[in-house]
Image: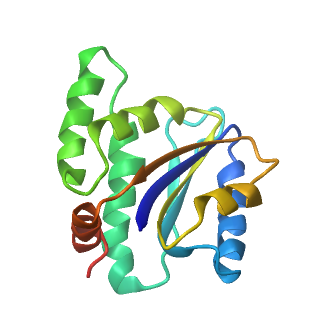
Amino acid sequence: MTTFTVWKFEDPDGAQHAATLLQNAEADGLVTVIDHAVMTWPAGADKPETRHSHDDAKHGAAWGALWGILGGALFAVPVVGGVVGLAIGAIAKSTEGAGITKDDLARIRTEVVEGTSALFVVTEAGNLDRLGERMRGTDKKLITTNLTDAERAVLLETFGGS
């Protein structure tokens, strides 16, 4: 099963620490990471910064588009009344069919704020319960979307370059 997961942390460095834990969990066979990105939003910064961590250049550009949508476009939207809802609706068109819904985008937009960080991960064949155990002691919140086979195919075709 493929999952799109967002782990939100209450400090700007939490997601980077969790990315290290994720890499260790993959090395131990708990999860297969298809791709991931770390978003940090230090106090005083105008917007978050997203670092994409895919090693394969061919696939990296495609995944970079997804992380750009989630980390860039989503947070470039001004927080003004109905403008946020309209903009999130437009951004959701980019992820339509890939299992990342408008509600997911809205939740990410409201949860990840200045002074926090997030780890975005696309995994396959993973044990999220055991992965969560690895992250015990970190101040985190898990938002996850389990993808259907059809959504997985769209996600990988659109952003995975395969």
Residue 55 image offset from top left, x and y in percent = 49, 82
Q: Nearer the viewer, residue 148 or 136?
A: 148
Task: Note whether 14 is above or below 157 in the view shown.
Answer: above
* Left or right of 44, for residue 159: left
Q: Quadrant of the C terminus?
A: bottom left
Q: Quadrant of the N terminus?
A: bottom left
Query: Which quarter of the figure has residue 43?
Result: top right
Figure coloring: rainbow
Residue 75 image offset from top left, x and y in percent = 40, 38
* Left or right of 79, for residue 11: right
* Left or right of 102, for residue 127: right
Task: Note whether 96 is above or below 116 in the view shown.
Answer: below
* Left or right of 91, for residue 72: right
Query: Which quarter of the figure has residue 135?
Result: bottom right
Q: Residue placed at 28% from the left, 37% from the top? A: 102
Query: Which quarter of the figure has residue 64?
Result: bottom left
Q: Residue placed at 36% from the left, 69% from the top? A: 63
